[in-house]
Amino acid sequence: MTTISVPLPPHMIEFIEKEVRMGNYTNKAEVVRKAIAKFQEDEAVEAVLRSERDVAEGRVFSGDLDELVKKLKL
């Protein structure tokens, strides 16, 4: 596992330390890993929602991908 160093504002540091003190996480790294995992999940959900909006608004391609590429290259 690689370690990275990221400057954080005081309110974020306090939040992380509080979570560890309360016993919700075993250490600071676990809090940060959980936050990043949640962010990844949120991004994946947002990508699905964007795709659903595109479909609802008719912004989709259908058909043979090779033929679509030919049409797009003009």
Image (spheres, helix red, strand yellow):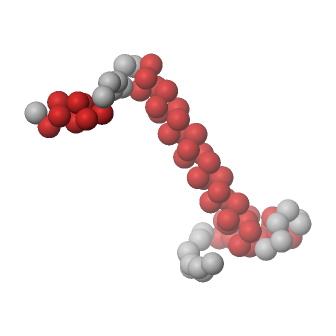
Q: Residue furthest right?
A: 23
Between 72 and 45, the residue placed more toward the observer is 72
Image coordinates of residue 21 in percent, x first then y, are 86, 70
Residue 32 visible to an observer of this rendering: yes
Q: Residue at x 74, y 68 (%)?
A: 30
What percent of the width, then of the height, locates residue 19?
81, 64
Residue found at x 50% / y 39%: 47
Residue 13: quarter of image: bottom right
Residue at screen point 65% across, 70% down: 10
Image spot of residue 9 (x, y percent): 60, 69
Q: How many marks?
A: 0
Q: What residue sits 24% from the left and 31% below the top?
A: 68
Q: Residue furthest left?
A: 74
**Compared with residue 24, is residue 42 higher up or lower down, i.e. above or below?**
above
Q: Quadrant of residue 1?
A: bottom right
Q: Is residue 26 left or right of residue 40?
A: right
The quarter in which the C terminus is drawn is top left
In-front residue for pair 19/72: 72
Counting from the top left corner in percent of width and height, residue 23 is at 89, 66
Depth check: give the residue in front, 51 or 9.
Answer: 51
Quarter of the image where one finds residue 72:
top left
Q: Is residue 14 visible?
A: no
